[in-house]
Image (cartoon, rainbow, N blue to C red):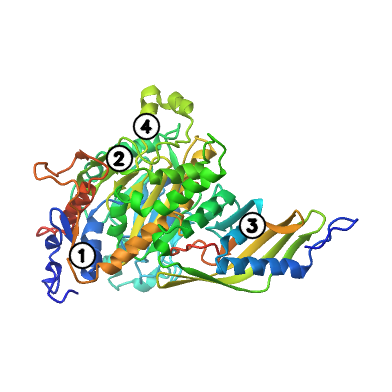
Amino acid sequence: MNAPTAAGPVPPTREQLVDFVAHEAQLLDEQRWDEWEALFAADGWYWLPASPAARDPLDEACHLYDDHLLRTVRLQRLRSPQAHSQQPRGRGHHLLQASTVLERDDAAGCWLLRTPFVYTELRAGHTVTLPGTARHTLVRVDGALRIRLKRVDLLHADQPLPAVEFYL
Amino acid sequence: MHAEGPPGAQDAHEPDVRSLVRAHEVHRDVYRCPRVFALEMQRLWARAWLFVGHDSQVPEPGDFVALQLASQPVLMLRREDGAIAVLHNRCAHRGAPLVPEGPGRAGRALRCPYHGWAYRLDGRIAGVPQRGGYAGSGFDEAAAVQGLTVYGEVAMHRGFVFARARADGPGFAEALGELLDALDLIADRSPQGRLRVAGGVLRSVVRANWKLYLENVNDAFHPPSTHASVTGAAGSTWAAAAAPGQEPPLALRQLLPFGAGFDFFDQMGARLLPHGHSILGTRQSIHTGYGGLDAQALRAAHGEVRAARVLAFAPQNVVFYPSMALKGSPQVMRVLRPLAPDRTLLEAWAFEPEGAGPQALRSALLYNRQVFSPLSMVAHDDLHLFEGQQHRLAADGNPWVSLHRGARADTPEAPPRDVGGLDEGLLRNQYRAWADLMAAPAPGQP
């Protein structure tokens, strides 16, 4: 991250923001989960709504809404030799479209990116393909970009879904 | 099918379903055979009282929900007189769908988008465009002039709407029996005695037979082995994160009890009821520890004695055979919709007890996304095993699935009966009902 100057921290470039999102997807696909979790701010959430119009993760049904504690449990479970559904270990693959910066508030230190994707998961010989759009709300913590909220809107959000096991 | 002819396939036209179920075993074909599945829809699912919906989904006349019930497209519709109708969602004219699946509002009439036939909210025809064209055609005597086909009998208790396509067997109150008391206890979690469906429904497609799923709902023998991955992860994560003596957050209090031992699950107790129904967790369950209700408000509303009963009722699952399983605490419900012998649609619903504050609904929604979501932390291990069973039961080998656990030659099996939580009598009870409901209709019966 750019070094702070006397006038305050230098805001991230568009390229730095877009690279952050691509790197985040790479860490997921390579199952480097500790490094992935470290990309979140301490109060960062991951949200996968069950409706394209979802507004509230607590008062509406959603497929997943995880804070640091629940992400840690989920990732720990995936590593467990007792996770029957991960024998053999599944794999996920992100095909990302280049992110666009939807909102940029350099003064507040907050940036919103939109990234259309196609996610494919392979598990127990079955393939699931899910198109969708990720929205990353990024902030800066100790000079580094961090995720405050990753919201993933699936094309099939409100449709019956098969089991999907990894973070998209 | 099996090369040597499994017992269920002796008749080329109709499986001999009774030969597929023994006292303590079921034949693998009950899970796999397409003809058995077709008969299940025609007989079992048509004769049983099926959960349709909740009346809070259709508060005003003309409100409806269109859904699949036992492979039939139907409408649950609030009529002008306040009663609830369950009608086939198919125009009497040429079979076009009247409304798409999901909730909607018809106002005072349903109108077919194809040729504009209109129906009153009880299904009778309200109008046919260009009616003069039918003069002398015999139309007035045709079945179409009767309007929308009624699905069958409809009954409701505490807002829970049930229907059966064929009036063959006991009526609603007798068929549900003690389950009506369970509905009362769950509805009285609201100080006003009313539940409301809220927050939205999570839906999953399971690549397994509906009975493999419903057996698991009644199976307290599996969590220590099946769910070790998530309970181990939740335990170790909390041990590393918590201050000494700190209580885990609700999210973990919902997950950790899946790791209770065999003794806990056996002592939770179960009650077997007629017609395949059951209550698992009559004395305690993994849900006992997090009620989330205002006990004082419930005592004020229902009195000391009733409130104590309501608060103590936290079953693992109340099974409304074959279509639904309900928990009391949190107020969540699973609805099963068989799609094919090897495919089942699962819905997870949440209820808000009216007047109980937002926390009870939030607890239900939290439970659903942690445990029943397609991105659950708990269900993946279950689903992986059901899907594996579905596949492996196709393989040659012993074709009989064992349900012996807890059976004793000196103990009659017939319900009602109280058993330990680990007793596979819960599953034998389902298959006793299965055999009854699958029996060929008596001569002269539909």
For disc 4, the chain is B
Residue A23, horizontal then vertical, whole percent: 65, 68
Q: CA distance from mark 3 to mark 2?
A: 40 Å
Q: Give the numbered dot on residue B28.
A: 1
Q: Earlier in the sequence, mark 2 or mark 1?
A: 1
Q: Look at the numbered discs 2 and 4 and tell me whether their residues touch, using CB distance below 8 Å.
A: no
For disc 1, the chain is B
Q: CA distance from mark 4 to mark 3?
A: 42 Å
Residue behind mark 3: A38
Q: Nearer the viewer, residue B351 or A108?
A: A108
Crowd rating for badge 4 (residues with CA inside 10 Å; few <14, some 14–19, many 20+)? some
Residue ID at (68%, 70%): A99
Are both tags, 3 and 2, on one chain?
Answer: no
Q: Earlier in the sequence, mark 2 or mark 4?
A: 2
Q: Left of B397 or right of it: where is B373?
A: right
Task: Tell which residue pokes out farthest to the bottom in this image.
Answer: B3
Residue behind mark 4: B312
